Image: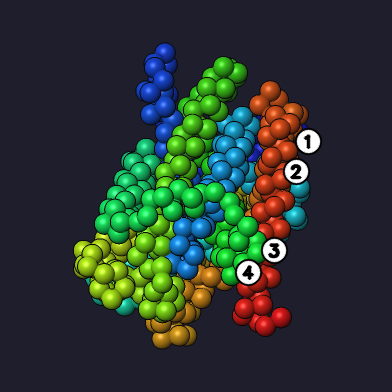
Amino acid sequence: MKKNKAIHYANGPSLEDINSTVNIPKNVGFWRTLFAFSGPGALVAVGYMDPGNWITSIKGGSEFKYKLLTVILISSLIAMLLQSMASKLGIVTKMDLAQATRENTGKKLGIILWIITELAIMATDIAEVIGSAVALELLFKIPLLLGVIITIFDVMLLLVLTKLGFRKIEALVVTLIAVILLVFAYEVLVSNPNWGEVIKGYFPHSKLVTNPSMLTLSLGIVGATVMPHNLYLHSAISQTRKIDRNNPKDVRRAVRFANIDSNIQLTGAFIINSLLLILGASMFFGHTKDLGGEEFVNLYNALNDHKIVGSIASPILSTLFAIALLASGQNSTITGTLTGEIIMEGFIHLKFPLWIRRIVTRGLAVLPVIICVILYGGKESAAEDLLLYSQVFLCIALPISMFPLIIFTSSKKLMGEFANHKLISFIAWISAIVLTILNLQLIWETGKKFFGF
């Protein structure tokens, strides 16, 4: 392996236009320092509360009440572990995960890995495009196809925010997360859940593995939670803070506060996913047939249906649901576009003007959705099926990102004193292997369902 300085010079920094652009104050207290480092964790956290998570969490609550809350908890803890390693990799080596992988593979394998990862980014973005388009249809009666086309222009917002500074992107994402959190906190409160059963739901139980239907949905929640693009994203945007990388004390401080920021934001994502499942359980448990499947439109209509949710049914609840869905889609499209840049530059060293890179990244995600909508006459059910297939593909791509991350961050040659402790590496390997097995199981179960084998 080459020395770090040679690697940095060959690859160049991640996202050069925003790298080391956020100043960190010196000799200030804990809270001011934490505020300066806060932001990247929020951009990562949105990937754990995207429209794909919505469907699996609400469905989990509506079918099995609060029993799958333990799956959300375990998935969130694994996510915290992986994301802390991703941010540390970027801060210590000044390389993102794509650059580090390419540096240790070669051109041909790098291109193959880029294609697979690019497809994973596309698969992730498909859920965000569908979520945003459906939200526009629900709120403004915009046809689904037109809503999908409108999402192409999301990249212009990102271009404007980038010109204004990376902190503006972070501020917008945090604001949208706050909107989602407040909406679902309100809807859960008015749904009056059984809090005793909620607490019990966080404890594992045997039915998770003995009940085939519960196991399949549990795998879906895990697959929708831990996604590969977040590892690339975090390893890159952790470099946006301006620190003295020749000063070990400064690097240690950056690693520490990046980890705190990530854990705080992922705790927020854990709370939102819990709220989604609690909402599904308290409002829809026992009414899965009335929902007519797992479409966003049916959930929107159910919140205004007295037969399903009782006296609390209201157009306000439906509207708030659609607003939160739009916020979730917009948040995730911002991070998906950034990740597209990261993997293109990291794996194949290909650089385009900023606006071209972002339009290409968005176009790759929008195209299959447009084709699907046109072929099936604008039916939301077809878009939902596409969303499901995209989540299954993410299961295939996840090990390609997880295993290199663990290898790199466990290497003393690459990370020096910041290499993972042996216990952390052991837990990470066990988590990665278990996740891979669960994802393979999800692929098998999905294949049996749709192809009959």
Q: Amino acid at mark 3?
A: Leu
Relative vertical location of residue 253 with respect to residue 225 in this rendering, above or below: above
Q: Secondary structure at mark 2?
A: loop
Residue, disc 1 = 1
**Kind of residue at disc 2:** Asn
Q: Are marks 1 and 2 in contact (CB under 8 Å)?
A: yes
Q: Earlier in the sequence, mark 1 or mark 3?
A: 1
Tell me the mark number nearer the camera, choosing from 1 and 3. Answer: 3
Q: Earlier in the sequence, mark 2 or mark 3?
A: 2
CA separation, marks 2 and 3?
Answer: 26 Å
Mark 2 or mark 4, which is nearer the start of the sequence?
2
Residue 244: horizontal and vertical position, in percent? Answer: 53, 21
Determine the image quadrant of residue 215.
bottom right
Mark 4 sits on what residue?
212
1 relative to 349, above or below: above
Residue at point 49%, 37% (across, down): 263
User: Can you identify the residue that label 3 sits on?
Assistant: 440
Horizontal and vertical percent position of residue 128: 44, 62
Q: Quadrant of the N terminus?
A: top right
Q: Residue visible at 49% across and 31% down?
A: 260
- 4 or 2: mark nearer the eye: 4
Query: Mark 1 near mark 3, Cβ–Cβ under 8 Å?
Result: no
Given residues 394 and 298, the one toward you in this image is 298
Q: Residues within 10 Å of mark 3 (few under 14, many from 20)?
A: some
Q: Secondary structure at mark 1?
A: loop
Judge left or right: residue 412 versus residue 439: right
First in sequence: mark 1 vs mark 4: 1
